[in-house]
Image (cartoon, helix red, strand yellow):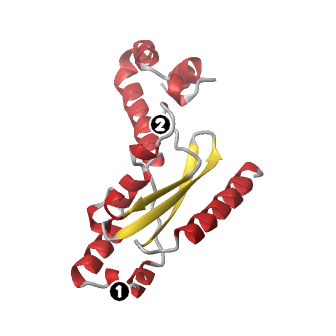
Amino acid sequence: MVLKLNLILNTFLVGLDLEEINIGIVQKMKEQAGEHTTLVGDILDAVANSMEEEGQIQVYTSGATNLFKYPELTDTATAQNLLFTLEDKQELAELIDNKLESGDKDDEPRNDIQVYIGGETPIDSMKDCSVVTATYRMDEGVYGKVGIIGPKRMDYEKVVATLKNLMNDLDSIFKNK
């Protein structure tokens, strides 16, 4: 059984990119598996699930308490909402993955700086803040984002310059690896 499964997987999948695996190929694999169709289906489902988990956005935050140095962000309700957003990370992931930041038809992110000021920020709890993000590329189709959250009165010129330098440094690091 393991030998047959190995033969089926190698016959149909060797040399294919993930994007090239389609329903037709999966159906042919299941047909070749005969009595082991369910097993092949379970294996393909497990592979698909692990690929989905691997592609999920990871959000890391630090320096959140620095936000409370600004009087406009220290109001109890505002501070509480910001902390919930930073702890939950779901809204931050949506901001990072926001389709407004896609520059191409194929949903590849643009290599640039995005600035959201107050109400432009797609996260309600950050309406009193500004968010500046920079995108950098690591590998083909893989990218990262670095962002700064601060008051609407932040020094945008300084923040954008700092993020551009960081983005360029990260691009160089990942392109030279």
Residue ID at (37%, 70%) = 129
3 vs 120, nearest the viewer: 120
Residue ID at (50%, 39%) = 103
Identify which amino acid the numbered label 2 is placed on: Asp
Numbered circle sitting on residue 71: 1
Residue 127, placed above or below residue 14: below
Q: Is residue 28 left or right of residue 16?
A: left
143 vs 133, nearest the viewer: 133
7 vs 159, nearest the viewer: 159
Element carrying mark 1? helix
Disc 1: CA contacts within 10 A as few (<14), some (14-19) or many (>=20): few
Numbered circle sitting on residue 151: none
Question: In terms of image quadrants, where is residue 160?
Answer: bottom right
- Nearer to us of marks 2 and 1 is 1
Q: Residue 52, percent across and down? A: 42, 42
Q: Residue 153, percent across and down? A: 43, 75
Counting residues from the N terminus, which is met first, the one under dot 2 or under dot 1? 1
Identify which amino acid the numbered label 1 is placed on: Pro
Q: Is residue 141 left or right of residue 1?
A: right
Q: Is residue 135 left or right of residue 101?
A: right
Residue 93, placed above or below residue 38: below
3 vs 22, nearest the viewer: 22
Spatial CA span between label 2 and label 1: 38 Å
Give the residue at mark 2.
107
Residue 138, placed above or below residue 41: below
Residue 90 in view (yes/no): no
Q: Residue 34, percent across and down? A: 39, 14
